[in-house]
Image: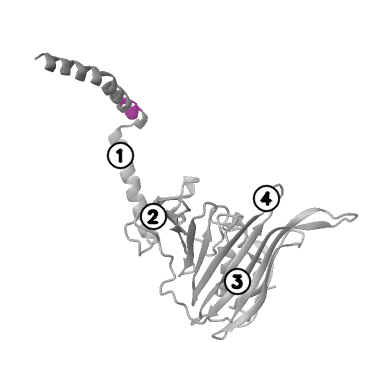
Amino acid sequence: MGLTGVVFSSSGAEYEVNGRITQTITDLGVSAIQTTNEFTVFVRDCAWLIQTLATDGKGAVWQREVGSTNGMEIYESNVQLQNPPGTKQTRIVSQSFISGNTIPVELLDEGVDGHLWLMFASQCYWSSLNTNTTSLTPVYDWHASVGANPNRKVRAEWELLGGRGSLPREVRYLGQWDETNGLYTVTGTKSVGGILVPNGFIFEERYVGPLAADSFIHEMTLRKRVQAEVTSVQAVCSRKSLLPVRGDVKTVIVDWRVKEASSGNNIPSYIIPNTEKWPSVEEARKIVEAGRIRTKRMQDALGSNPSEHRSKVVLIVMCIFLVGPPLIYFAWQRLKKS
């Protein structure tokens, strides 16, 4: 289903959605994985921020924030708010990432940000599509993430809540035989400042399974199910900035924007002292290049063969431990005799 009608201007759109999202993943031969996250989605014009709270398998509480203010770069921050039970760790543990993606497809299969963005914060995305668009990025599939193939598209059909530039009522991702592999469906709506916002949604991912009994038709096997329930919606965005809040000054930023095609799986990372500001692409390139120069200087100082240098250091240390004690002993004995 394509998009028709006049271009919708989202200028002035502002709202905030709170709720709970539960996801269950069932793969063959593996126990089902179920996760539940509390979430808040902040939207102002075309900028958005998704905040989720979750408890990991060790009992630690993590706050995850993913957001974009320019539609071209996505920023992510993961901060541990509460230590696992029984631990005495005092330093805040945090991780940060930046990607040049326009759609927040998760690197991990169990991520939920793609679901929340599509159903609560994607109105500007729909208004930017050409009217003849027939393929979409599968936001639920990590194979379309920045770490795999961010250009991945699949055929899709969709219906929007209020025409071009509004949020979706239903999105259907199709397979090679026109089977439905992924389906998002709104369970209800609420009007906020004249904008229709889902009051909840269900998503199901299915794949072609074995032949049904006494039939030539393959069964569609459920692999992933997501249910989101909205607890409150307000026609105001309480966050002044829709960029994620980073942890302390020692937080490492992994930056996909400055990754060289020839670097393989090596993703540039760095630390900046300013926890308030996220670096631009130009600033990130300068930081990465400065780090590369420092590393080269250190290697040059160690010699052309760092492993040989390390061997020399180890040999010297061993000699000190082997020769040192006898020398000290004899010196002490002479001191006693004198």
**What is the three-letter code of the residue carrying label 3?**
Met
> Which tag, 3 or 4, sits closer to the chain's start?
4
Between the C-alphas of marks 3 and 4, the distance is 28 Å
> Residue 1, labelled with which disc?
none
Whether residue 159 is visible to the viewer of this picture, yes or no, is no
Between the C-alphas of marks 2 and 4, the distance is 34 Å
Q: Is residue 141 magenta?
A: no
Between the C-alphas of marks 3 and 2, the distance is 31 Å
Query: Which quadrant holds the N terminus?
Result: bottom right
> Which tag, 4 or 1, sits closer to the chain's start?
4
Rendered position, 242 above or below 195: above
Q: Is residue 134 left or right of residue 286?
A: right
Residue under label 2, please give it: 251
Query: Helix, strand, or loop for circle 2?
Result: loop
Query: Helix, strand, or loop for circle 1?
Result: helix
Rendered position, 183 above or below 199: above
Query: Helix, strand, or loop for circle 3?
Result: helix
Percent across and percent down for residue 216 are 87, 55
Q: Residue furthest right?
A: 214
Percent across and percent down for residue 308 are 34, 27
**What is the three-letter code of the residue carrying label 1?**
Met
Residue under label 3, please give it: 119
